[in-house]
Image (cartoon, rainbow, N blue to C red):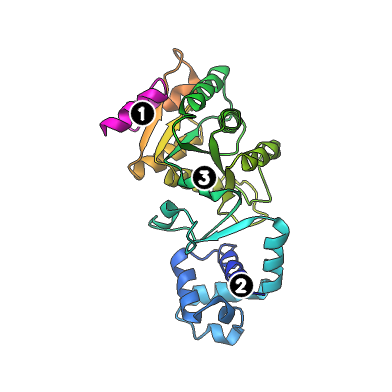
Amino acid sequence: MNMREKTEAFFLLMNTVPVFNFETAKNILQQCQNADNFWKLKMEDIEHLYLTCEDKEKLRVKLNKTNLDGLVKKIKDTNCRVSLYSDPDFPVSLRKLKKPYMIIFYRGNLEALKNKHLISIVGTRKASLYGEKLVKNLVEDLSGDQCTVITGTAKGIDSYVIKYCLEYGVKCVSILASGINKISPTSSKSLLDQLTKNGGCYMTEFPFDVGAYRSNFPIRAKIIAALSEEIIIVEAPRTSGALHVAREAFSMSKNIFTFPSYFHDSNFYGSHDLIANGLAILVENYSNIQDYRQLY
């Protein structure tokens, strides 16, 4: 077993319950000097690490329940790729966050995130025909502009985004709210497989076997917002998870755009609120976004 496998297993361990934050995980690795020494730790050695009593106990629990061979086998069996915060291909924007991510799991081409423009397109699961048409026109318009589109995996707007990115040859990166071996909804799997064949990828920071729990969606929203230069909310009622993305993006000073709707269309009430509260800019097409980009 080589050092890389031991290091990947270390960060996978740090990212499973009970989770250590990035700074604590980095501190543990630095004290051990490398992952090889970490995996040689005995229970009595933990007492000599410079950690809080609570963190020492958490580490004992982790090492009691887990073994190195099992983690390495899990990574291999899941047939995914791993990028660590120190790797050259690790997304820079995730490394620069106040609370950086330490590990991501992905399938496909992570280089898609190095395109000229990174634009997230998100919206409601209960998309209307009008919402689908907005997505289709938007993706078609941006297809010649060296863009990578970032979205989720849900039914509705997310699925339409992936569908039309495939149709128009636009690279797409889909962010999961679950472990990479627990794609949700399962109906998205065939779309995601096609996405990877089209030069895109799907990725997650959640460890293996983690389901798409409600509490994961705000975390996923933060990743979508962090990866994107611009955020487009296509169609969002007031209960839409897409609004989490908008709020995270606003806190990061990203440009947020949204579309007009039919009169009194509740599927756009959340979008209207973004405009009314000064969080989003109203646009009618991708050309408006290009114009705004040139002005600012």
SS state under label 3: helix
Q: Residue 6 — which label?
A: 2
Q: Is residue 282 visible?
A: no
Front position in the image: 129 or 133: 133
Residue 13 in the image, given as x and y percentages of width and height: 60, 67
Look at mark 1 in the image and give the residue it sits on: 290
Residue 118 falls in which quadrant of the image?
A: top left
Q: Which mark is residue 112?
A: 3
Q: Is residue 277 left or right of residue 54?
A: left
Between discs 2 and 3, the one toward the N terminus: 2
Determine the CA span between mark 1 and mark 2: 45 Å
Q: Does residue 295 sit above or below 7 in this rendering?
A: above
Magenta stretch in the rendered image? 272-296
Residue found 35% across the figure and 45% down from its top: 252
Circles 2 and 3 in contact, beta carbons < 8 Å: no
Judged by its main secondary structure, the magenta piece is helix
Labels 1 and 2: the sequence-earlier one:
2
